[in-house]
Amino acid sequence: MASDETKILLRESEMPQRWYNINPDLPAPLAPPIHPATGKPLGPDDLAPLFPMALIQQEMSMEPWVEIPDPVRDIYRLWRPSPMFRAHRLEKALGTPARIYYKSEAFSPPGSHKPNTAVAQAYYNKQEGVTRIATETGAGQWGSALAFGCNVFDLECTVYMVKVSYEQKPYRRVLIQTWGAEVYPSPTDRTNAGRTILAQDPDSPGSLGIAISEAVEDAATHDDTKYSLGSVLNHVLLHQTIVGLEAKEQLKLAGEDGPDVIVGCVGGGSNFAGLCFPFVKDKLDGKDIDIIAVEPESCPTLTRGEYRYDFGDTAKLTPLLKMYTLGHTFIPEPIHAGGLRYHGDAPQLCLLVSQKLIEARAVHQLGTFEAAIQFAKAEGHIPAPETAHAIRGAIDEALKCKETGEEKCILIGYSGHGHFDMAAYDRYLAGELRDYEYPKEKIEEALKDLPVIEEG
């Protein structure tokens, strides 16, 4: 019997002590990352210039559980366990028999799920004597989270922020600077990768692929610096599983026998994977769960990309990963959901999509803001534009239940608040936003540059 409680909380002592590693439970082996120079599978030593060895070991681990270090758990206690809410008022507004829950990561200091891995990555870098970390950020959630994590562990931090987001979201930039990090609009003239892009297009709006190139180059050319990525890689998704592990326990407290539907937004895949991976194990074990990944129509990686090996960045400095991709030269339209503007996705997530265990959907920008406003009016909380994609998908599912009369349990990944995104809401309310559907011809053009890798 489902509870009528609105807020479902765990005690601090019930915070998970281990992260869940999905690698040994995947239905097929992951294709190995490929060295960009040799064309051969990467080994731990190949990644050592970029990452501390502890994270490299987690990246390749086949152990089902990884202990969370006590210093990391100590910082987590600032906001974890994070709350889950029953969306009674949204259910009533929709007239749906569905029971809607949302697991909120908006109460972390940076306001999103990102510090779950930022704090962990800063800790492991500090343990291995690193003094500075370089990274990229799209909308600024990851950059602010890593700035927070580096501040906690007394590390320097350099952030390359996609130029269009740097201009759209000035308060994210201020947040990054407040925690002591330096932040630059990418492409910059600080790196060869940035200078090359600026020579081709002085007015380039930037992209995550370009910003990644700059951050990787920065790390690779400075002995005191390592690189940090906020999504896509296995160890990043591993750290985020604390979200789904907590959600499992909270649904039990609410009297639910698990969710019937899980909906999250996807850019690189970390918040979505963090919520759903612990439940994917249940689905693999035979439980009937619909797991829905929602992305923007303007950057339709999972829905219109190809499942191929590709570079993670524009300058082709990163290892090649097998993933759904729109091509590493893809430059997305400047939608306000900056955290979802990435040409690829996490290999673990892509494998599960290819195996039909996860369904991918693409939605338009205006529909997501419509859903965000509807949610804000009903529940009071203002979601980030990225999070609004998950809410759009969940509302669509709830309306299906209204038509069929099914009393499903729907779980939303509420990845972050929209307090730094009010300029986007302002433009939507003023009628200044429009939908983008990326032209098929432009996607085909970007896909022409994919590398050819013989598998097996």
Image (spheres, rainbow, N blue to C red):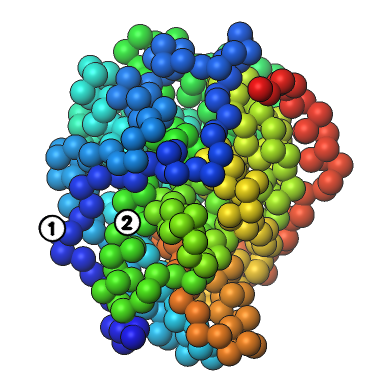
Name of the residue lying farthest toward the front: 286
Mark 2: few/some/many CA within 10 Å (<14, 14-19, 20+)? many
Task: Name the side, left or right, on which 257 lies relative to 42.
Answer: left
The quadrant of the picture occupied by the C terminus is top right
Residue 434 image-quadrant placement = bottom right
Look at label 1 and name its amino acid: Ser
Of mark 2 and mark 1, the one earlier in the sequence is 1
Q: Which residue is mark 1?
A: 13
Task: Say which residue appears at 58% left-offset and 29% top-offset.
Answer: 31
Task: Say which residue appears at 72% left-offset and 43% top-offset.
Answer: 305
- Closest to the observer: 27 or 235? 27
Mark 1: few/some/many CA within 10 Å (<14, 14-19, 20+)? few
The quadrant of the picture occupied by the N terminus is bottom left
Q: Which residue is mark 2?
A: 245
- Residue 145 picture location, percent across and down: 35, 42
- Residue 113 picture location, percent across and down: 37, 51
Look at label 2 and name its amino acid: Leu
- Closest to the observer: 433 or 32? 32
- Closest to the observer: 14 or 73? 14
Task: Say which residue appears at 63% left-offset and 20% top-offset.
Answer: 316
- Residue 223 picture location, percent across and down: 35, 9
Res 111 seen here: no
Res 327 seen here: yes
| Label 2, label 1: how far apart the Cα atoms are | 14 Å
Judging from the image, what secondary structure is the residue with disc 2 in?
Answer: helix
Judging from the image, what secondary structure is the residue with disc 1 in?
Answer: helix
Task: Name the side, left or right, on which 146 lies relative to 27.
Answer: left
